[in-house]
Amino acid sequence: MKFPDTEGYFGQFGGNHYPPEVWPALEELTSTYRLLRYTPDFQHDLETVRVGLQGRPTPVHFLKRTTAEVGGARIYVKREDLNHTGAHKINHCVGFALLARKMGKRKLIAETGAGQHGVALAAAAAYFGLECEIHMGEVDMVKQGSNVGRMRLLGARVVAANAGQSALKEASDAAFSAYVEQRDHALYAIGSAIGPHPFPMIVRDFQSVVGHEARGQFLSLNEGVLPDHVVACLAGGSNAMGMYSGFLDDPGVALHAVEPLGTSDETGKHAATLSFGTLGTLHGALSIVLQQEDGTPSQVSSVASGLVYPGVGPEIAMLHEAGRLKVSAISDEEAISTFFRIAKSEGIIPALESSHALAFAIKLAERSPSSESILVNLSGRGDKDVDFVLNHHWDEDDS
Ligand SMILES: Cc1ncc(COP(=O)(O)O)c(C=O)c1O
């Protein structure tokens, strides 16, 4: 990968905009990562945990019934929902846990939104015999209660974040402060391809297994022909960067980023950063941010907790500025109806986050010829969302 540069920049975005007292810890992480990552020993241990704990490789699967119903381009999904713990997040969690082991750290710290990253990190910590501390917004703890229970069962300590909106941004603030205090014995396993250097690079590298696997699998399913479109939902960008990594050098493949439009395009009712954001600093990196005039992050909203974040990772911002990404936004309502549709037609309950990508893929398929194909990153399963959707959006007529 050409980016980031030695200062951690992706074009004008990224870098390390945290106070100097954390620089030594981040420099230690950068140099250890660069030293270890491509050694045969690290590769072997990573492959072992990916196969044994995670269940990789995950398949690419053709959505036969949906494609037939829509009548346009063929829709395929990369089944990251089949990962152990239910989402793509575990791809970088096992990587951070292995790094922590090799660095002699005894604890992992992170934030979580929907709870998927927290559960994945708790499982990785248990596998490697590490302590785990997860910060989660109080609002999300109520909405994603089953994931809170799973984290605790896996041995993690869950700490409620109750500042501001009590959601993902506040959880990230709290997790990073905890890391700064405990950096001598703990490693911060950030939840997305965000934050100061080297986190966006490390998360992208560990997530790139998704895109590289998917590319090979798609080619063998389609007689050596690449997809015309690759689609991922977007918050910080871990599932998107993972998927795009396999196709960045294929100019004929359009890369689509699908943002949460929430209930409206009014500030406070969506979390569509690339669509409405501006240049700013968030969580130690220069990127595109949804912010108020004084630079404080805007309130954001989406029915999918994992998409409630007022920024994007720096590499996403660079790809967008370079014109490599096509950006669209999907409303809560569209995501929920796609959640029901895919469950009924395909026997797959997608996460509400992934339902945004699927909803866009269906709209794109409708207006594309049947000769074209679309590959969607089905980033997670919707088990965590079932109670919420049934309690708030289930109509007896749907049964
Ligand atoms: C299933 C799923 N997909 C997507 C996301 C969005 O995060 P990212 O943009 O880092 O992939 C989340 C975040 O929690 C998630 O749980």
Image (cartoon, rainbow, N blue to C red):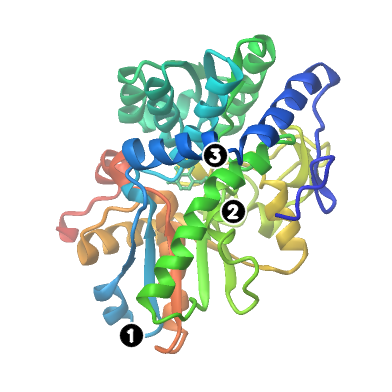
Q: Which label is found at residue 40?
A: 3
Disc 2 packing (10 Å; few <14; some 14–19; many ≥20): many
Q: Which residue is drawn at 32% across and 37% down?
A: 52
Task: Tell me whether the residue at label 2 lies in contact with that at label 1, contact meaning CB atoms closer than 8 angstroms.
Answer: no
Q: Distance between the residues labelled 3 and 1?
A: 47 Å
Q: Residue at x 53, y 34 (%)?
A: 41
- Secondary structure under tag 3 reads helix
Residue 46 lies left or right of residue 342; in this view the side is: right
**Percent of width and height locating residue 45:** 46, 34
**Percent of width and height locating residue 253:** 58, 75
Q: Distance between the residues labelled 3 and 2?
A: 24 Å
Q: Which residue is drawn at 42% across and 28% down?
A: 124
What's the residue type where badge 2 is placed?
Met
Among the two numbered marks 2 and 1 on one chain, the one whose residue lies closer to the N terminus? 1
Residue 348 lies left or right of residue 326; in this view the side is: left
Residue identified by numbered label 1: 71
Q: How far apart are marks 2 and 1 (CA)?
A: 29 Å
Residue 80 visible to the viewer: yes
Q: Which label is found at residue 278?
A: none
What's the residue type where badge 3 is placed?
Pro
Q: Which residue is drawn at 49% across and 33% down?
A: 93
Q: Which label is found at residue 241?
A: 2
Residue mark closest to the camera, 2 vs 1: 2
- Secondary structure under tag 2 reads helix
Q: Give the position of the N terminus as an image quadrant.
A: bottom right
Give residue 252's quadrant in the image: bottom right
Q: Give the position of the C terminus as an image quadrant.
A: bottom left
Residue mark closest to the camera, 3 vs 1: 3
Among the two numbered marks 3 and 1 on one chain, the one whose residue lies closer to the N terminus? 3
